[in-house]
Amino acid sequence: MLGFHEHIIADLLEDSHGGLVVTGSGLGLHKLIAALIKLHDVSQGILFILSANDSQRQTIKEEIQPRTLPPLEVINSDYTSQDRVDRYGYGGVFFITSQILVVDMLNEKVPLSRVAGFIVLNAHRLTETCTEAFIVRLYRFANKKGYVRAFSDKPQAMISGFSKPERIMKNLFVKKLHLWPRFQVFVSEALEKNPPEVIDIRVPLTSYMKGIQSAIIEVMDACLKELRKTNKVDVEDLTVENGLFKSFHDIVRQQLDSIWHIIGRKTKQLVGDLRTLRKLLDYLVRYDAVTYLKYLDALRVSEGMRSVWIFAAPSHRVFDFAKKRVYQVVRADGGKVGSANGLIKGVGRGRGDAGKRRKISGNESASKRSNSDRTQETENGSSRDAPGVELEVVGEEMPKWKVLREVLEEIEEERQKRTASEVDPHISQDAWDDGVGAVLVACKDERSCIQLQDCITKGPQKISGFSWHIYCRSVLS
């Protein structure tokens, strides 16, 4: 436990009624909870921990594993009503779901006079009508001396709505707010003692990705200009630079929450479109080309006529460049082809691996495609008697995938050199294989983790080929 953890606990213990603690992300919130559990004694009564997810329960239990007292149990639906009553009689520390606890409290199966207090995690999710607020209210009516200590490590979630921290404190019947950002003196001193060695690698975007990025920014600028005309929000906040951040949507909604029920449909759609465009910028550098194109196709179908940004002038470049990242249609004589819908249907029945071409002659086009497809080809300048065309599956690789493989290969070479030279005799080859020298790749979400795992183990070409087959099936269906 670091020094600022001790200061946070000392501040909490000064007030016997508890308080609300908001820390910066990644400051070891589980260490604080584990320390408070260790300080709790069975003679003090029962301690309930609410709103903890599975990962938080696991990390807290691992942190206090060397200590066996007080007993730490997870009460869920596996326990019968009588089993829970027996556990409450023994006392201790309990992870419990709010649904089970509120039922036991209403049935008077919980001895509220013997409850020392509550620890509430993820306090940023609390509302006036949530079950946790109702539990604390029942507890306060029966026990005026116990404490309620709430924690949150998502400070950005505290700015949504009007005076959200104040409303949360009112719901929890606490009077003190403890703020511990990263720039707080004790926190910054602890983090600067052992600063990590950071190597920043800037990965340039491909030409098509740059084209998509610039087109999306142009559409965002057009949507912001339309939103300024409504005179409902602060003009200073409506800039493209602010629109690139996740908090922008919360800032706009915060200004419009009080009048959301009276503003027009177009204004509401513009707010939603700005959120969609920010997602498109995020997904551009996160997902592969085929997944990105499939997401764009889904947006075109789901939003349809309701959307404003789809009908903006630069939006067609977004769809055009996204298709060119996946496939390109060329004639055998080098000419251009305007549409590829029929060709995708043809390739969907074939192999269509990434980096390969499927050639379709005039006779094959006449026998395998419908009249509507042939009519469309005629409109685009081709016909049954025209030379064959080829659908070239590009499957553009994500630039950061290549850089990641190069970094991992460099780490592997350095690891082998270190093991061979025995510079560090404490780390042997067996130790490396057991995970002592493991490389941690941090991702934003689970989907990115799965995709990167496949990229490292199978290679980007197989991922592109598999995604292309899925995309062809979706077009056929």
Image (spheres, rainbow, N blue to C red):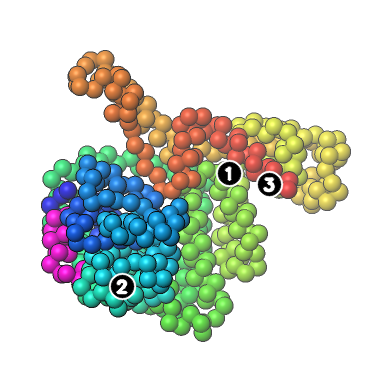
Residue displayed at 62% across by 55% down: 298
How many marks the image carries: the answer is 3
Whether residue 270 is in magenta: the answer is: no
Q: Secondary structure at mark 3?
A: helix
Q: Is residue 254 left or right of residue 315?
A: left
Magenta stretch: includes residue 12: yes
What mark, if any, has residue 222 been given in the picture?
none
Q: Quadrant of residue 237?
A: bottom left
The quadrant where residue 314 appears:
bottom right
Residue at 46 percent across and 83 percent down: it is 259
Q: Compared with residue 477, is residue 358 higher up or lower down, i.e. above or below?
A: above
Who is closer to the viewer here, 400 or 338?
Answer: 400
Left or right of 56 in this view: 39: left
SS at circle 1: helix
Q: Position of residue 445 (x, y in %)?
A: 43, 48
Range covered by the magenta-colored residues: 5-19
Amino acid type of the residue that numbered disc 3 sits on in the rendered structure: Ser
Residue type (three-letter) at the residue carrying disc 2: Tyr
Question: How many neighbours does mark 3 have within 10 angstroms: few (below 14), some (14-19), or many (20 or more)?
Answer: few
Q: Which mark is residue 474?
A: 3
Disc number placed over residue 290 in the picture, else none? 1
Alpha-carbon span between mark 3 and mark 2: 54 Å
Identify the disc placed on residue 139.
Answer: 2
Give the distance between the C-alpha atoms of the residues marked 1 and 2, in whole angstroms. 54 Å
Of label 3 and label 2, which has the lower sequence position? 2
Q: Is residue 169 above or below residue 210?
A: below
